[in-house]
Amino acid sequence: MAKPRWYDRFAPFYDAGTIGDLFYRKPRKAAIDQLNLSSGDSVADVFCGTGVDFPLLANRVGEKGKVLAVDGSSGMLEQAKARAEQYPASRRFEFLRADFSEVDGLNSLKEAIDKEAPRHVFFSLGLTCLANWREFCSLMFDAAPSGTRFSIMDVYSERLTLGARFINWIGAADCRRPVWKVLEERCESFAWEQFRPFKVLDVSVVVASGSKP
């Protein structure tokens, strides 16, 4: 994973750079739909970035629900906190900064999951940034109670095309990582869907989901 300061630099410009989430809008909605959220639910938004997921998540969990927003970049979290203030019940949001590539960061996240016990976990465009993505997913899976619903949205390319190299550079990632594999191996009702918003780059966006037995 790139050092958090890499993402801190992009935080003020991230939303403009993604053209208002234009390319990710459809797969993002599909991934959040797969969480099967209801009013009053608690959800962990892992790799929350600037809070792009908040409108959809807040609408589904309602004022009695809770969103645990987690990211490794303090700059991204500052943008996310500002976005959360737009909601009348901004108290529904809690924030955690943790570097998932470090043991201390993993332990902080595990403690938060143990404490909050969210029954829904969303990984949003971040697993491909982790060299230890399998360990990270397994830790999250093991910490979650039975019945927890997981959903992933992330980029993927089978080949290291020029477009894949560009995506990797922008996100300090490796989009050849099949980051849905832990869910596929360990979840019930596993589902996988592929979107192609970056046809010119020959890079897909994958949505995967499942429930812990």
Image (cartoon, grey):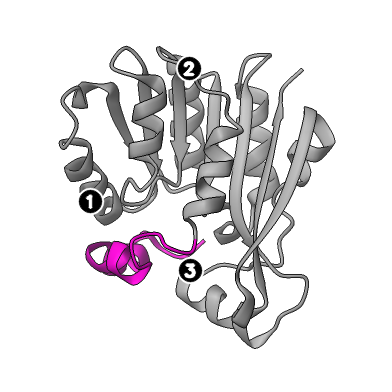
Report, in whole angstroms, how far the alpha carbon at label 3 lies from the one at label 2.
Answer: 32 Å
The answer to which of 87 and 185 lies nearer the viewer is 87
Instruction: Report the side of 9 relative to 140 (left or right).
Output: left
Q: Residue furthest right?
A: 185
Q: Is residue 2 magenta?
A: yes
When the figure is inspected, residue 92 is found, relative to residue 133, above or below; the finding is above
Q: Is residue 14 magenta?
A: yes
What element does badge 2 sit on? loop
The residue that appears at 29% across and 28% down in the rendered structure is 94
* Residue 121 found in image quarter: top right
The residue that appears at 63% across and 25% down in the rendered structure is 149
Q: Are marks 1 and 2 in contact (CB under 8 Å)?
A: no
Tag 2 or tag 3, which sits nearer the N-term? 2
The answer to which of 107 and 143 lies nearer the viewer is 143
Stretch in magenta: 1-23
The residue that appears at 51% across and 28% down in the rendered structure is 110
* Residue 12 found in image quarter: bottom left
Tag 1 or tag 3, which sits nearer the N-term? 1
Instruction: Report the side of 196 relative to 53 (left or right).
Output: right
Q: Position of residue 15 (x, y in %)?
A: 30, 62
Q: Are marks 3 and 2 in contact (CB under 8 Å)?
A: no
The answer to which of 126 and 28 lies nearer the viewer is 28
Badge number at residue 38: 2
What element does badge 3 sit on? helix
Q: Position of residue 26 (x, y in %)?
A: 52, 52
Say few, some or many: other residues with alpha carbon within 10 Å of mark 3 (under 14 / 14 to 19 / 20 or more).
Answer: some
Say few, some or many: other residues with alpha carbon within 10 Å of mark 1 (under 14 / 14 to 19 / 20 or more).
Answer: some
Report, in whole angstroms, how far the alpha carbon at label 1 lies from the one at label 2.
Answer: 26 Å
Badge number at residue 79: 1
Eye-nearest disc, 3 or 2: 2
